[in-house]
Image (cartoon, rainbow, N blue to C red):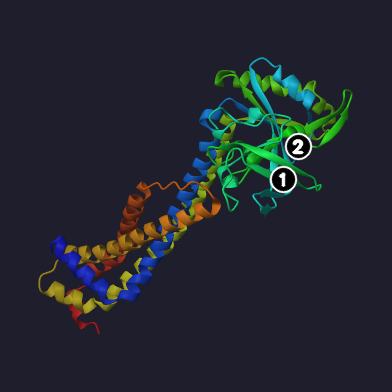
Amino acid sequence: MNPREALSMSLRAIRGHPLRSGLTALGVLIGVAAVIVFVILGASLQAAVIGEVGGEDAERIYVWNGPEDAQGPPGAGARAVFTEDDIDRLHAIEGVDGVAPYASVDANGFEHGGDTIAGGDAVATGPEYFTDDAIAEGRAFESGENEVVLTPLAAEAFEEDVAVGDRVTITFDDGSEAEMTVVGILDGSGPRSPFDGFGEDARVYVPADPFHGTTTETADGDQRVYPYVVVTADSPKSVDGVEEAVRTYLEDESDASEALPATFVVETQTNEDLLEQVNDLLATLTGFITGVALISLLVGSIGIANVMLVSVTERTREIGIMKTVGARNRDVLQLFLTEAAILGMLGAAAGALVGFAGGYVATRLLEFPFVAPLEWAVVAVVTGVLVGALAGLYPAWNAARTDPIDALRYE
């Protein structure tokens, strides 16, 4: 029997039982779709994190504090203990190019052109927080001024888009209001640091001076205090040395070291550290994906094997007739293997389409960039064919060794 003839007979058998064939392929479809959705989410998460905090921000060191056994993302459990004097001293460390405080400021609403949007916090930081190429329009704000920088999503949140030079009014949690000039629109709405969280968002950045109001009493009088600090080294090569010097100062000589509880420690992290954590996270995610894939595809292969066994039973007389007119064992084996492989391929192809569609929807909901590894579509189809062929191997072998006399007697 030539392959074309086997293909024609297999397709005819599949079309003869459309519902059963569809349900059989559904098992493979679900398994392949689940794999592709998780692969897309992993790749998109990698793009969201590595794309935002890697590369051009390689000189940055993120500093915060927290309990020794704290779990969670960078900054989890941090207290506002880094004083303005600490920031000035960090500035003086050799190899440091810039230091930006970072804190959240509670806001009740933002108003522009009579349109008010409620809720959301503003980020209080310094102009050093923005790299030279981070501003798509305008410039970074200046400390001490009523100026604000927005992400594109924040600028588009109002009925009338906000542009550089427009005025917005921020109502803070204590009821006070501040009319501010928009001086800059960022080049994207993604996070500028791990303290911004993941994904794109409508972020509003204001100068820490004068809009961050948390203070503490020190020997030099009241000073603003911050839970996070972003230090920028003057080159990627000096990052390690600067990180060590920053940690030494903050642990031994800073105002923060005196204010921190005994169970708290100073944490520092570079972008290289973050990338390693992301890779570890993705490795864990890959393991999870592999587990889901194995379970799902196992279920799908069991379904194919079950249907093929039923098909062999139903077509026992047909097998007997085929052998009587000259069909060899390998012809029968080829026929049933082809049918099983087609079921696997159809399920995998449909699963690839559903997986890419589901991955797109998931990344839109999570506001990740959509990254589609198209090679996985090919891998999915090949996997489906292999799963189908392996699942159909025993039923096909069982059919091939059927005695033609017994088959013709079968009722």
The kind of residue on which mark 1 rests is Ile
Q: Are marks 2 and 1 in contact (CB under 8 Å)?
A: no
Kindly tell me whether residue 198 is visible in this rendering: yes
The quadrant the C terminus occupies is bottom left
Mark 2 nearby-residue class (10 Å; few <14, some 14–19, many ≥20)? some
Label 1 SS: strand
Percent across and percent down for residue 122 are: 69, 42
The quadrant the N terminus occupies is bottom left
The kind of residue on which mark 2 rests is Phe
- Numbered circle sitting on residue 211: 2
Q: Looking at the image, which residue is at 78% across and 37% down? A: 79
User: Is 406 on the left or on the right of 56, as rendered?
Assistant: left
Nearest the camera: 358 or 365?
A: 365
- Numbered circle sitting on residue 170: 1
Nearest the camera: 88 or 21?
A: 88
In this view, 67 is above or below 272: below
Query: In whole angstroms, how far apart are the C-alphas of marks 2 and 1?
Result: 11 Å
